[in-house]
Amino acid sequence: MNKLVECVPNFSEGRDVKIIEAISDSIRSVQNVKLLSVEPDKDYNRTVVTFVGEPEAVKEAAFRATKTAAELIDMTKHKGEHPRMGATDVVPFIPISGVTMDDCVKLSHEFGKRAANELHIPIYLYEEAAQTAERRNLANIRKGEYEGFSSKISDPQWKPDYGSVVFNPKSGATVTGARVFLIAYNVNLTTNNKDIAHEIALRIRESGRTIKKENGESIKIPGSLKAVKAMGVMLERFDIAQVSINLNNFNITPPHVAFEEVRKEAQKLGMNVTGSEVVGLIPKEALLIAGKYYTPNHFSNIKEEEYIARAIEALGLSQLERFDPKKKIIEYMI
């Protein structure tokens, strides 16, 4: 079996085509790496890039892309809807075939050490590479975002895993690590009220919300879905609010379950869902599960393509931009 690793770095630039293309070219320049998708979002002002290849080649491509981003992106001028802390915000390594999670943890350490030493970017390790329980969750590391990082980095609790305790104003900080396949999945609402989207996010995400009683005691109320992170965002160009979701394990919570849960909570608030979108790539199995869910029991002998088509239609995956299975399903791209 060939050794294959996926990398899905997120860059804090979604509007300047020249910068996005330069980052993409730096990845294309590495042999034994295949660039699968480049998805910029103007409202998020963020680009999600997906590439796969042999482990050492993927590590090199990740470094070159980070170097290019450090040269071309100035975080002192960055604004966008999505939380972020650096020009290269997060660099996850994901085992696909012939490699283990431990192999990807090792890649993240090696990438992080080099990026810190050569690019002078503070590096934090998360998920399976995290050195402490608190740093396992990306949201904990990113809390305060770029604007709060100049003071956060001086807190001994938030000393970088690699690099000096020195804030880099131009590039910010970068998080790297190893994780299972994550689906970035957003559900569109019949409202442009971001607060409503965020209220739904609080109700469904695993971490839920924390409230304080009159006596000052804090109570944590968990959300309804496991292995799910979510927040409310606004897409200005479509004038709609979204529930922006990370499905950390689609075998626990697949996209159609998240979609239906958002629909249920939206209806409680007098709203509804209009469709959804996948940012980056999605495993074929996730769509097959959804297609079977939306297929009446009396149908039989349905081909794989038909299940996928039913999932695309039922989830409204082409509402904002056409969902092309050949370009969005990872197995079809590799």
Image (spheres, rainbow, N blue to C red):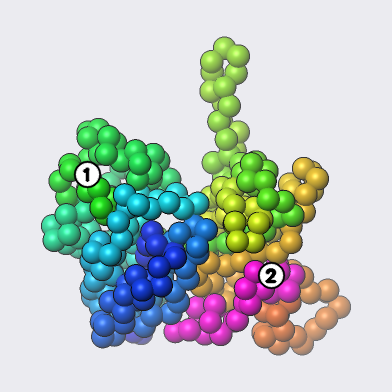
Name the image quarter holding residue 200: top right
Query: Is 101 displayed left or right of 331 in the figure?
Result: left
Residue placed at 40% from the left, 62% from the top? Answer: 13
Residue placed at 22% from the left, 44% from the top? Answer: 167
Inspect the magenta stretch and tell me whether residue 331 lies in it: yes
Residue to which mark 2 is pinned: 319
Residue placed at 57% from the left, 35% from the top? Answer: 209
Q: Earlier in the sequence, mark 2 or mark 1?
A: 1
Query: Is 57 displayed left or right of 52 in the figure?
Result: left
Q: What amino acid is found at the position of numbered circle 2 in the picture?
A: Gln
Residues rendered magenta in the picture: 311-334
Residue 332 vs 65, above or below: the answer is: below
Pointer 1 local density, CA inside 10 Å: few below 14, some 14–19, many at least 20: some
Residue placed at 43% from the left, 79% from the top? Answer: 36
Inspect the magenta stretch and tell me whether residue 155 lies in it: no
Query: Is 130 displayed left or right of 329 in the figure?
Result: left
Instruction: Work out whether residue 104 or residue 323 is closer to the camera in this orientation and state it.
Output: 323
Q: What element carries label 1?
A: loop
Q: Find residue 35 and report its horizontal and vertical position in percent.
A: 38, 80
Can residue 203 be seen in the rendering of this structure?
no
Query: Is 15 displayed left or right of 177 in the figure?
Result: right
Circles 2 and 1, Cβ within 8 Å, touching? The answer is no
Name the image quarter holding residue 115: bottom left
Q: Is mark 2 on a helix, strand or loop?
A: loop
Residue 167 is labelled as: 1
Q: What amino acid is found at the position of numbered circle 1 in the picture?
A: Phe
Q: Find residue 265 and report its horizontal and vertical position in percent.
A: 73, 47
